[in-house]
Amino acid sequence: MFRWLMRQVGKRLARYLERPSRSYHPLVVNNMAFLKQVMKPGDVLLVEGNLRISSAIKYLTQSTWSHAALYVGTLDGQSHMLIEADMGEGVRAVPLDFYATYNTRVCRPVGITPEDEVKLVDYMANRIGNTYDLDNIVDILRYLLPNPPVPTRWRRGLLELGSGQPTQAICSTLIAQAFHSIRYPILPSITHQLYCSIEKRNCAPQAVLRRRHHSLFVPRDFDVSPYFQVIKPTVEMGFDYRETVWSDH
């Protein structure tokens, strides 16, 4: 009975947090034709969301981006598809056009092999249908105060608080797990160890990467990662400022 009650409360809170914010206005309109031409499987699409939960995530992460989805291309016969984790519906596939009216950014993993690209997409596709644990009310309550009076250094920690199933609590943690599965770095911690070569008879410090826990990742990490390239569709398609039409009013 208690578990059923908590789940009902969780559903109500999730519906509240997923309502659009009236204050959201996109800065630019996406050219979807350009976006569809430049997107490749494995690209991460960052989104400036317009939901109430988006305001909290943007504040806690001090970033424009509140949501992340992985572009997988063709899925079950449908082209230009994304896979994402949604609080209400869980892990799902949505068309790229779903975010046509949002501010977005494309982050591309550099040098990923075709084999690992397939593994990355398969990892996400195999988790479609996973649902968010709405019984864990603590996971949801942390988003009810869009601007909590919390010092900057503690804000990211709030995104982990009470997280029983972090891959479904924050969209970016599921994507982080997918990249970890192919040993591709996002924002690893770096230590240096002394490496000695017998052949060269010398020793030199060598950087060693250590994975951070997937629950620590937020959407902006793909933007600031040195291992992801920011792709701007308008630039990629050959932008020429001399062809722009300006209004003099």
Image (cartoon, rainbow, N blue to C red):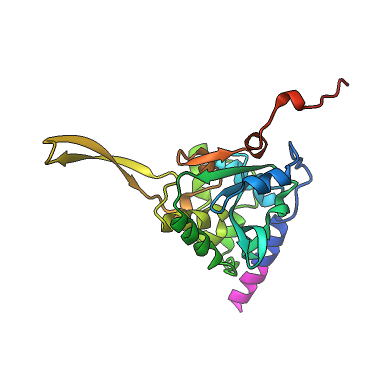
Q: How many numbered marks have been drawn onto this rendered protein structure? A: 0
Who's the residue at 67% across and 59% down the image?
Answer: 79
Who's the residue at 52% across and 39% down the image?
Answer: 229
Q: Quadrant of the C terminus?
A: top right
Position of residue 173 in the picture relative to residue 49 (left or right):
left
**Closer to us: 54 or 44:** 44
Q: Is residue 35 above or below residue 17?
A: above
Position of residue 82 in the picture relative to residue 242 (left or right):
left
Q: Is residue 4 magenta?
A: yes
**Closer to us: 74 or 205:** 74
Q: Is residue 113 above or below residue 27?
A: below
Q: Which residues are magenta?
A: 1-9
Q: Quadrant of the N terminus?
A: bottom right
For the stretch drawn in magenta, the main secondary structure is helix
Who's the residue at 47% across and 61% down the image?
Answer: 119
Who's the residue at 41% across and 56% down the image?
Answer: 182
The answer to whether residue 88 is seen in the rendering is no
Measured from the top left, where is residue 13 in percent x and y?
68, 61
Measured from the top left, where is residue 5 in percent x and y?
64, 73
Measured from the top left, where is residue 239 in percent x and y?
68, 31
The answer to whether residue 28 is seen in the rendering is yes
Q: Is residue 144 magenta?
A: no
